[in-house]
Amino acid sequence: MKTGLSKLFELQPDPYDNTQSKFLRICLVCLFNFIELCLSQFLRESQRIL
């Protein structure tokens, strides 16, 4: 019975572990920066055409 309980606790996430949320936040910031860079380049090119 103890082995079943230990496996159950291994599957549950650690509530005090915030490394995944930090990683997700960093990924989202990088994604938004990339989108902003692409949009600024697009706007620059569209101004040259006009």
Image (tube, rainbow, N blue to C red):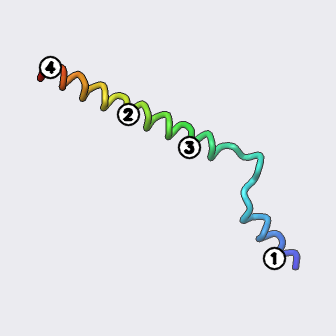
Q: Please provide percent x and percent y for residue 36.
A: 37, 29
Q: CA distance from mark 2 to mark 3?
A: 15 Å
Q: CA distance from mark 1 to mark 3?
A: 31 Å
Q: CA distance from mark 2 to mark 4?
A: 21 Å
Name the mark nearer the viewer: 1 or 2: 2
Residue that lies at the very extreme toward the right in this rendered image? 2
Residue at disc 1, secondary structure: helix
Residue at disc 2, secondary structure: helix
User: Which mark identifies residue 48?
Assistant: 4
In terms of image quadrants, where is residue 47?
top left
Name the mark nearer the viewer: 1 or 3: 3
How many residues crowd around disc 3 within 10 Å: few (fewer than 14), some, or many (20 or more)?
A: few
User: Which mark identifies residue 4?
Assistant: 1
Identity of the residue drawn at 53% across and 37% down: 26
Identity of the residue drawn at 43% across and 38% down: 31
User: Which mark identifies residue 34?
Assistant: 2
Question: Mark 1 is on which residue type?
Answer: Gly
Query: CB under 8 Å between callouts 3 and 4?
Result: no
